[in-house]
Amino acid sequence: MNKTIINKVVEILENEYQEVACTLNYRAPLELLISTMLSAQCTDARVNIVTPMLFSQYKSVNDFADADIKAIEEIIRSTGFYHNKAQNMINCCIQIRDEYNGEIPAVMEELVKLSGVGRKTANVYLSEIHHTPGIIVDTHAKRLTNRIGLTKQTEPEKIERDLMKKIPKEKWSDFSHRLVFHGRAVCHARNPKCEICKLNEICEYNKKNIKKDI
Ligand code: SF4
């Protein structure tokens, strides 16, 4: 897909979803970090249901670092993979307390050293809290970028690096949010609504399907 068409995709999504933002609820950087960890393999809506209870009981890095894993598991159970998530959030906060003086690091290279924090979580955190542009490759971004033809890469980190070369840096974060919005509204994992999609004339997936029908 050439640069002109990629710019067109960016522009169409900008027009379609003018106001975009992270859909996880949080009041403080630690809450965003924990919420993003919880959102793996889970919807933001589900995470937003469990976090008020979680954050009413665990308010600080020390609270999480000293937490009883079973008590956390009980609260976050409905988000899936709750044992690993609970273990990761405790270990992550132990690292922040013991290795980073209680401060969540503000750079990618350090964030990804934290337990349970991959590039996706780190990019969400950095773009929201520090306004550092980032391509956030979640399940929607992965599916849509492949379908549309923005990348041929299939591994999240390779998709991220590929898109970083193709999309202007200042647009990285909002473009990522727009992919999520479009994935939720139109380009569903099953039965994408190609017939009403504003990208259907340039989307590789749709073009292939039209050819099959002819
Ligand atoms: S045309 Fe279809 S596959 Fe392509 S982005 Fe739109 S909904 Fe998704």
Image: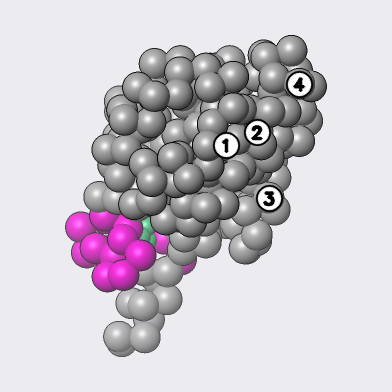
First along the sequence among labels 3 and 4: 4
SS for dot 3: helix
Q: Residue at x 68, y 28 (%)?
A: 94
Observer-side mark, 3 or 4, equals: 4
Residue type, mark 2 in image: Cys
Residue 81 belongs to magenta span: no
Where does label 3 land, which residue? 157
Label 2 vs label 3: CA separation?
Answer: 21 Å
Q: Position of residue 199 (x, y in %)?
A: 34, 53
Circle 4: is it few (<14), some (14-19), or many (20+) Cα within 10 Å? few
Q: Position of residue 123 (x, y in %)?
A: 59, 33
Residue span colored magenta: 186-204
Q: Position of residue 118 (x, y in %)?
A: 65, 43
Residue type, mark 4 in image: Asp
Q: Residue at x 54, y 31 (%)?
A: 67
Q: Main secondary structure of the magenta part?
A: loop
Circle 2: is it few (<14), some (14-19), or many (20+) Cα within 10 Å? many
In the picture, the quarter occupied by the N terminus is: bottom right
Circle 1: is it few (<14), some (14-19), or many (20+) Cα within 10 Å? many
Residue type, mark 3 in image: Glu
Compared with residue 155, is residue 97 higher up or lower down, i.e. above or below?
above
Q: Mark 1–mark 2 contact, CB under 8 Å?
A: yes
Q: Is residue 109 shown to the viewer in this render?
A: yes
In the rendered image, which quarter is residue 61 located in?
A: top right
Residue 191 belongs to magenta span: yes
First along the sequence among labels 4 and 1: 1
Where does label 4 land, which residue? 98
Where does label 1 land, which residue? 89
Instruction: Report the disc number at residue 37.
Output: none
